[in-house]
Amino acid sequence: MFNENVGTSPIEYWISLKMTEAKRLIRNGELNITQIAEHLGYNSIHHFSRMFKRFTGVSPSAYKNSVGN
């Protein structure tokens, strides 16, 4: 039912919310990438980076450079 109404699985939706928050936190510039990963519940910076790139198309550091932080 969730899939039909939202267009994605609950897990994919949850991850996309986390990635939206990650982008906001990167733009904010108060936390580094490792702190952001921990804040969002990732135990591994590598896993966070892979998920971020999967959802945004760029690495967290490339995103950070593109927004000027």
Image: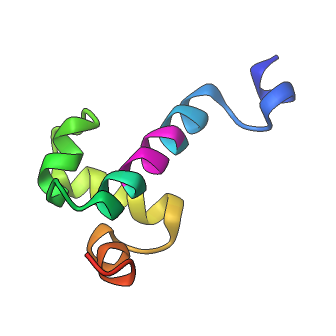
Q: Nearer the viewer, residue 66 or 1?
A: 66
Q: Nearer the viewer, residue 29 or 59?
A: 29
Name the image quarter holding residue 12: top right
- Decide: is 58 above or below 56: below
Looking at the picture, how far across and down is residue 14, in whole percent? 52, 32
Residue 62 in magenta stretch: no
User: Could you tell me residue 52's position as x and y percent?
Assistant: 40, 58
Predominant SS along the magenta part: helix
**Which residue is at the far right?**
4
The magenta region covers 17-22
At horizontal 40% and vertical 53% (from top left) the residue drawn is 24
| Residue at position x 49%, y 49% in the image | 20
Depth check: give the residue in front, 5 or 9.
Answer: 5
Q: Residue 66: x percent and y percent?
A: 38, 83
Q: Position of residue 50 (x, y in %)?
A: 34, 60
Tell me which residue sits at (14%, 59%) in the image: 32
